[in-house]
Image (spheres, helix red, strand yellow):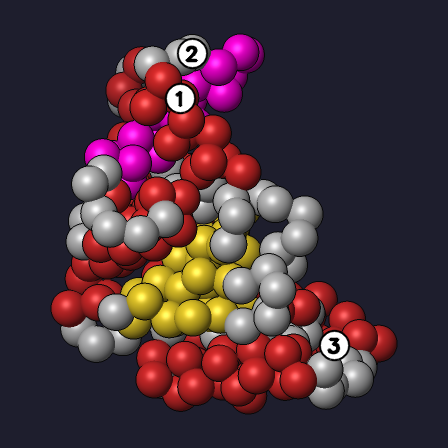
Amino acid sequence: MCTRCESKAHAPSRRLLLQAAGVALTTIAAPSVVLAQSAPPKPENVLSPDQAFDRLMEGNQRYVQGVARRHDFLNEREALTTGQNPYAGILSCADSRIAPEYAFDAGRGDLFVCRVAGNFLNDDGLASFEYAVQILATPLLMVLGHQACGAVDAAVKSVGDGTTLPGHLPALVTALTPAVKAASGQAGNALDNTIKQNVLLNVERLKNATPIVSKFVADGKVRVIGGVYQLDTGKVEILQ
């Protein structure tokens, strides 16, 4: 056999190289998936969508009444080093007065929270929730607006006056404009109406987000809801 032929005989084929690369990637990616599916660090978080909703609202009721539980962060910390399995994902406003973990009396590892001023769904937030439902098996997603939202108020005024806000603030106005227009002409307080419309529009967008979230919703594995946090009482009112 010539030297050239001999080198070809011992050289790995392209198919074998691709197969080896695939095995390597699977080995790297698999542990987190297995941990989320077969060995959840918080077994009490393995719930149906309706059970997760009940637990979320029971936590809010305790918060409103001022009887929040004492959370054992020390033991939770050790358990959560192996992974996470939050029972609910929350799309919340970045407002400093809104703290989902407090509002729902939740412990570490319970809530998967994405926050942005105006609590609207962008590509980054959607990708995060796709990760939550597909990899972490999170059964409940909530879009959480709040009373007297400054971002929504700025959008209402900017659209109404035709003014352009400084810096990157126009990006927030653009994202919130559909809610401003949807609430236009409704009876009642314009800001309150727009806050609710913003929640409802983003619930629908999240619920129908293809290809991942919409499939989980259709299969009954994930429920998407909307709520508005009341600053004066701490109560989260669910929107239908």
Let me know if residue 85 appears in the view: no
Q: Is residue 175 magenta?
A: yes
Residue flagged by tag 3: what amino acid is it? Glu
Dot 2: what SS? loop
Question: Outermost residue, right direction?
Answer: 74
* Gap in angstroms between the C-alphas marked 3 and 2: 47 Å
State the residue at coordinates (31%, 52%): 188
In the rendered image, the vertical position of residue 129 relative to residue 88, given as above or below: above
Q: Which residue is mark 3?
A: 76
Q: Is residue 105 magenta?
A: no
Q: Position of residue 178 (x, y in %)?
A: 25, 35
**Could you tell me what secondary structure mostly forms the magenta stretch?**
helix
Q: Position of residue 88 (x, y in %)?
A: 47, 69
For the residue pair 9 and 98, the one nearer the viewer reads as: 98
Q: How many other residues sit within 10 Å of disc 1, few (<14), some (14-19) or many (≥20)?
A: some
Q: Earlier in the sequence, mark 1 or mark 2?
A: 1
The numbered disc on residue 164 is 2
Q: Are marks 1 and 2 in contact (CB under 8 Å)?
A: yes
Dot 1: what SS? helix
The numbered disc on residue 158 is 1
Q: How many other residues sit within 10 Å of disc 2, few (<14), some (14-19) or many (≥20)?
A: few
In the rendered image, the vertical position of residue 12 relative to residue 71, given as above or below: above
Q: Are marks 3 and 2 in contact (CB under 8 Å)?
A: no
Q: Quadrant of residue 233?
A: bottom right
Q: Quadrant of residue 194?
A: top left
Residue flagged by tag 2: what amino acid is it? Thr
Magenta residue span: 165-181
Question: Given this view, does label 3 or label 2 mark the residue nearer the observer?
Answer: 2
Residue flagged by tag 1: what amino acid is it? Ser
State the residue at coordinates (40%, 44%): 191
Q: Earlier in the sequence, mark 3 or mark 2?
A: 3
For the residue pair 220 and 165, the one nearer the viewer reads as: 165
